[in-house]
Image (cartoon, grey):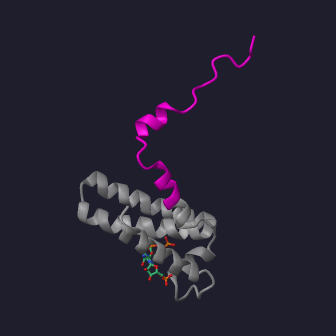
Amino acid sequence: MSGATADVLDRLFEVVTSRRNADPNISHSARLLSRGTAKVAQKFGEEAVECLIEAVMGNSSKLIGESADVLYHLIVLWVDAGVNPGEVWSELQRREGTSGIAEKAARPGPIANRSGG
Ligand SMILES: N=c1c2ncn([C@@H]3O[C@H](COP(=O)(O)OP(=O)(O)OP(=O)(O)O)[C@@H](O)[C@H]3O)c2ncn1[C@@H]1O[C@H](COP(=O)(O)O)[C@@H](O)[C@H]1O
């Protein structure tokens, strides 16, 4: 992720955080957060589905807008859950350079004989 990308997401997180106790008639973020975790999660899921539909349809210009919707609603989800973007950036940094194939192969396998007998 480029620095510019992280910056805009960090700024968006700060704005949404600042809206937590704002007037729900003025701020969409405040309105969404006031409706509770289930609603925040539902909206994120809906936006994700809209995003994947544009991807499957091969509509890359609409995919850009839907992707922005997904990121905004993910940030609302983080604010609701008390997750800081820096924690997510750190996790991505920790994974840098590790292939997904190699990571999956290194996971502990099932225990062959749980009874021990
Ligand atoms: N990036 C966004 C952003 N993306 C999408 N949306 C809004 O998300 C809403 C999605 O509309 P929907 O009809 O899908 O959802 P809904 O209105 O909750 O309707 P229901 O599903 O509940 O029926 C629209 O009102 C969009 O404008 C956003 N609203 C705000 N932001 C950013 O958040 C900042 C703070 O916004 P406020 O909290 O509104 O001040 C803004 O300056 C922007 O930078």
| The quarter of the displayed image where residue 111 is located | top right
Residue 6 % position (x, y): 42, 68
Magenta stretch contains residue 71: no
Q: Is residue 19 visible?
A: no
| The quarter of the displayed image where residue 81 is located | bottom right
Give the extent of the magenta segment.
89-117
Is residue 18 shown left or right of residue 92?
right
Q: Camera-side residue: 31 or 109?
A: 109
Is residue 108 shown left or right of residue 63?
right
Residue at 41 percent across and 57 percent down: it is: 49
Determine whether 34 is above or below 96 in the image. Answer: below
Q: Camera-side residue: 44 or 2?
A: 2
Magenta stretch contains residue 106: yes
Residue at 62 percent across and 73 percent down: it is: 35
Q: Can residue 54 be seen in this view?
A: yes
Is residue 44 shown left or right of residue 39?
left
Residue 69 % position (x, y): 41, 69
Q: Quadrant of the C terminus?
A: top right
